[in-house]
Image (cartoon, rainbow, N blue to C red):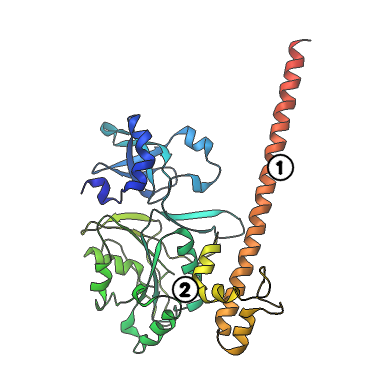
Amino acid sequence: MTFSHQLGWNVFFDRHFKSFQEQGFAVGRIAIENRDNYLVLSGGNEYMGEVTGKLLFNASSSSDFPKVGDWVVVSLFESENKAIIHEVLPRMTKFSRKIAGGKTEEQILATNIDIIFIVQSCDNDFSLRRLERQLIMVYEGGAKPIVVLNKIDLCDQYEEYISQIFRIVPDDEIVAVSAKTDLGMDRLKSLLEAGKTFVFIGSSGVGKTSLINKIIGKDLFETNEVREKDDTGRHTTTRRQLIVLPGGGLVIDTPGLREFQLWEADEGLDEVYGEITELSVDCRFSDCTHTQEIGCAVIEAVETGKLSKDRYESYLKLAKELVYLKNRQEQNRYNSKNRFKSISRAIKNFKKLDHKSKFR
């Protein structure tokens, strides 16, 4: 296996890189994204990377810039240990969210991921509703989710948490572990195949970094203990970074996220709430919102107990959030289009005035 294949290179990227390869460019993978530069892995070496002025000028949003996990087209200057980034190759998968705060903009957290481990813990952090939201985000980006229930040493009845997760996730996509006692760690490690990329996500304090340290076999990242009085904690990961594992796989450690705001999630919503998608086929109206319509099969299922009220209310909340988000995105596109038209008119008017002034 070549170094590039160890980093996750496959036929998908090879197909998109072929024309650049013919022009003499090299390829690298983004390991760390800093404010104005990047750590690029290429050919067994590390380079400090910077984007070209062309890429900087053509980028319409932050998502157009390289992100951790991206494969990029580069020119390498080995004597200077420097890489100039010309293009970002198309992404096979991604994990993104709406940026925190009031702005309606996508924040890409990691790209080209095979499996995303969603970490929840057996303490006050456990939340089925948050898990549903996280699953939607993972499905929408195209990666495979696996739920990791950590800190099972703290809970005698963790099987009850497993049974709750099993209602929305297949049994083979759930792993119960304890980073402290190593219980279940062998199964988790067995999922980390060479040449594949993995991401650990979850709230701060659930034990993501402790799990990664266990997988690596040493304390590569510093962690802070969870406070016993309120089960909260934090770790010192402040940026996303890609690490090559001893067994040949790759893992991306991410800071704990306070907000899991959806970005685009139509397919993810249908995937997580598959039973509601199936029920909706029998609704009287094809555009049924499942809120008040006569002949709604979903409402009927709630009334008869076939569908739990909690699942139904969670679905409605997320569906409403997506409608609001789409409206905001459409408004932004409309505003951007109008701004472009205004700039175009201004340029045309300037050219007319300049042309007239030449003949005075």
Residue 289 to residue 299: above or below: above
Image quarter of the C terminus: top right
Residue 131: mark in rendering: 2
Residue closest to the eye, 8 or 304: 304
Judge the density around disc 2: few (<14), some (14-19), many (≥20) Cα neighbours within 10 Å. Answer: many
Say which quarter of the image contains residue 226: bottom left
- Residue 25 at what x, y percent from top left? 34, 33
At horizontal 59% and vertical 73% (from top left) the residue drawn is 281
The location of residue 273, given as percent across then percent down, is 52, 73
Q: Is residue 322 left or right of residue 44?
A: right
- Residue 214 in view of the camera: no
Q: Is residue 14 above or below residue 232?
A: above
- Amino acid type of disc 2? Leu
C-alpha gap between disc 1 and disc 2: 39 Å
Report the front residue among 69 and 103: 69
Image mark for residue 338: 1
Asked where in the image residue 177 lies, by quadrant, the reply is bottom left
Q: Which amino acid lies under the numbered mark 1 shown in the image of this protein?
A: Asn
Q: Residue furthest right?
A: 360
Q: Is residue 286 something one can see in this rendering? A: yes
